[in-house]
Image (cartoon, rainbow, N blue to C red):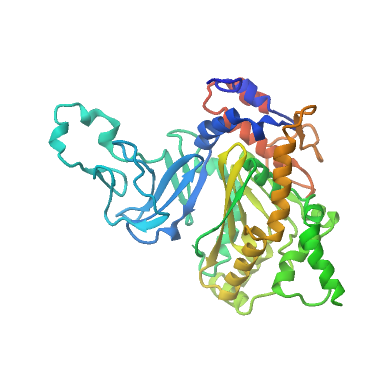
C-alpha cells in the first residue's frame, strides 16, 4: 500500500529541516521500507573483510540492508558478492554463515549449479528447457551479482544499484580513518579475529549510528557503569596518576568531562561520514604494548610509524551503517531488521605483525563495551529503547539535533568543529535525504535538502 512518502521525494526531504528531524525517520514502517529500497541500494554498504574468505571457494553469508548476499572468493582469487538466491525458485543457496563451496555452488532444491562468480554451470535434465525461451531469461544468467563491488585494502563494500555514485566519490577523504586502522599493522594488513559479538536492539538503526558521535552522553548515560567503576577505584585508594590495569584504562575515560570532549573535536566529510577525536580521544592514553613500537618502526620506518600511532581518532562513522575505531582495530555494523529492530555485529581485527597483547586488549574492549553482557552497552540500549518508545508520544513530532548549529552549514565540504557539536548527525541526515531520493527522479528533493 502506497503511503505519503512513497514516490514522493519532497515529502522525504521534508523529514529533515536543518536542526530538526521528524520522528517518522525512526518509527515509520513506510520510511523503513523506503530506506531498504532506496538508501541502502544507492549507498556503498559494508559487506565483510576478505580475510573471512582467504581461500578459493570460501564464502561468508550476510545481508546488505534486507538483501541476503554471499561474499565468495572466486577461482581467479577475486572477491564476488552475489544475491543469496537461486534464479530457479528463489531458494537460498547457502545457509551456513561460513564455509567452502569448492568450485561451484549447488542449489539444495533442484541441483542447479553455479560457478563462484554466479554464472550458470549446469541444470539437471537441461533438455527440458530447449525451445522454451529459457536462454533469454534472467535465470539463464545464473545467480545475480550485486551492482558494484570494491575491495578496499581488504574491506569489501557493495553498491546494490547498477549505476550510481562511485566508491571513490562516496568515501573521498574519509578513507583516511580506514587507512590509519590498517596501517597500524606493521605489515599494512588486518585479519578478522573470530566471529563478531552480536547484540539485538529494539530500536531504529539510526539511533545507534548517531550515538557513535554523540559526545554529550558518556558522562551521563554511563555514570551507572563507568562512573561506578571509577568511584570504586578511588575508594580503593588509587588516584588518577596511578597506573591502571587494562580494564580501567578502557572504562575510566567514558567519565571524561564535557571539556575533554569539546577539545577532542569532530571532523565531518561529505556523504554522511565523520569522526570524533581530531586532537585526542578516550584511546589516547592507553599503555604501550611491549614490542609494538619496534615492530611498527621496522615495518613503516620511524617517521611514518610516529605519524600513524599519533592519530587517535575515536569513532569514525561510515554512512550509512558502520563505525570503526582505528586505535583498537574494531568495526561495528548496524544491520536494520525493522523500523524498531537492529542487529549489531562487533568485529575486531588482528594487525598482522603486531604483538598478540594488542589483540588481547582489543578483544577486552569489545567484551567490556559491546557485548550483550556489557554494563556499558546496556546503558546505551536502555536509552535507545526509551527513545523508541518516547517518540510515539504526541505533541512534539520533531527530534532536535541543533547543538552548535549555525543555520548555514555546507555538508559538501570537510569541516572540523567543537567536539560536542551535533553537526555529524545533521551531516548524516543530509546524506540520508540525498540517497533516499537519488533515484526518485525529482531534483527538487535534493535541492530542498541542501
Task: Write down the quadrant of residue 56 in the picture.
Answer: bottom left
How far across and down, in percent of the image, does residue 64 sit?
49, 43
Q: Residue at x 58, y 45 (%)?
A: 172
397 relative to 122, above or below: above
User: Which quarter of the rendering shows the C terminus?
Assistant: top right
Give the left or right position of residue 68, taking residue 5 as reference: left
Q: Residue at x 81, y 64 (%)?
A: 228
Give the left or right position of residue 148, taking residue 248 as reference: left
How far across and down, in percent of the image, does residue 81 sit?
40, 46
Nearer to us in this view, 271 or 226? 226
Nearer to us in this view, 120 or 95? 95
Q: Do we see residue 117 in this rendering?
A: yes
Q: Residue at x 56, y 42 (%)?
A: 336
Q: Do we see residue 355 in this rendering?
A: no
How far across and down, in percent of the image, does residue 412 sit?
65, 36
The count of marks equals 0
Nearer to us in this view, 357 or 275? 357
How far across and down, in percent of the image, does residue 185 sit?
55, 67
89 relative to 353, above or below: above
Give the left or right position of residue 434, taking residue 193 as reference: right
Amino acid at each position: 500500500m502506497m503511503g505519503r512518502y512513497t514516490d514522493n521525494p519532497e515529502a522525504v526531504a521534508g523529514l529533515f529541516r536543518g536542526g530538526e528531524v521528524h520522528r517518522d525517520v525512526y518509527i515509520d514502517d513506510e520510511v523503513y521500507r523506503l530506506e531498504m529500497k532506496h538508501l541502502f541500494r544507492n549507498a556503498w554498504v559494508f559487506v565483510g573483510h576478505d580475510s573471512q574468505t582467504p581461500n578459493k571457494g570460501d564464502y561468508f553469508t550476510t545481508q546488505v540492508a534486507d538483501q541476503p548476499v554471499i561474499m565468495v572468493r572466486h577461482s581467479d582469487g577475486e572477491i564476488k558478492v552475489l544475491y543469496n538466491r537461486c534464479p530457479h525458485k528463489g531458494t537460498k543457496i547457502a545457509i551456513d554463515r561460513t564455509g567452502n563451496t569448492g568450485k561451484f555452488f549447488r542449489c539444495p532444491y533442484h541441483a542447479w549449479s553455479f560457478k563462484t562468480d554466479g554464472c550458470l554451470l549446469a541444470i539437471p535434465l537441461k533438455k527440458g528447457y530447449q525451445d522454451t525461451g529459457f536462454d533469454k531469461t534472467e535465470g539463464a544468467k545464473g545467480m545475480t551479482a550485486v551492482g558494484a563491488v570494491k575491495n578496499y585494502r581488504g574491506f569489501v563494500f557493495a553498491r546494490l544499484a547498477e549505476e550510481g555514485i562511485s566508491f571513490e566519490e562516496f568515501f573521498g577523504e574519509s578513507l583516511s580513518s580506514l587507512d590509519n586502522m590498517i596501517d597500524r599493522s606493521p605489515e599494512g594488513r588486518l585479519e578478522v579475529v573470530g566471529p563478531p559479538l552480536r547484540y539485538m536492539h529494539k530500536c531504529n538503526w539510526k539511533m545507534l549510528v548517531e550515538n557513535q558521535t554523540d559526545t554529550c552522553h558518556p558522562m551521563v548515560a554511563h555514570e551507572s557503569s563507568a562512573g561506578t567503576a571509577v568511584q570504586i577505584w578511588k575508594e580503593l585508594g588509587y588516584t588518577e596518576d596511578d597506573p591502571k590495569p587494562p580494564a580501567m584504562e578502557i572504562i575510566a575515560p567514558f567519565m571524561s568531562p564535557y571539556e575533554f570532549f569539546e577539545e577532542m573535536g569532530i571532523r565531518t566529510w561529505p556523504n554522511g561520514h565523520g569522526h570524533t577525536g581530531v586532537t585526542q580521544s578516550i584511546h589516547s592514553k592507553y599503555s604501550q604494548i611491549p614490542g609494538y613500537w619496534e615492530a611498527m618502526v621496522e615495518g613503516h620506518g620511524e617517521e611514518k610509524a610516529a605519524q600513524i600511532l599519533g592519530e587517535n581518532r575515536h569513532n569514525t562513522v561510515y554512512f550509512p551503517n558502520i563505525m570503526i575505531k582505528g586505535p583498537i582495530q574494531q568495526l561495528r555494523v548496524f544491520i536494520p531488521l525493522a523500523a524498531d529492530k537492529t542487529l549489531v555485529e562487533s568485529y575486531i581485527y588482528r594487525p598482522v605483525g603486531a604483538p598478540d597483547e594488542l589483540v588481547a586488549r582489543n578483544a577486552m574492549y569489545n567484551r567490556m563495551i559491546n557485548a550483550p553482557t556489557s554494563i556499558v552497552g546496556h546503558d546505551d540500549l536502555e536509552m535507545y529503547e526509551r527513545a523508541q518508545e518516547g517518540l510515539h508520544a504526541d505533541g512534539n513530532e520533531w527530534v532536535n539535533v541543533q547543538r552548535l548549529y549555525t543555520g548555514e552549514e555546507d555538508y559538501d565540504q570537510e569541516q572540523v568543529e567543537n567536539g560536542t557539536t551535533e553537526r555529524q548527525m545533521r551531516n548524516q541526515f543530509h546524506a540520508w535525504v540525498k540517497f533516499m531520493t537519488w533515484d526518485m527522479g525529482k531534483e527538487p528533493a535534493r535541492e530542498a535538502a541542501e
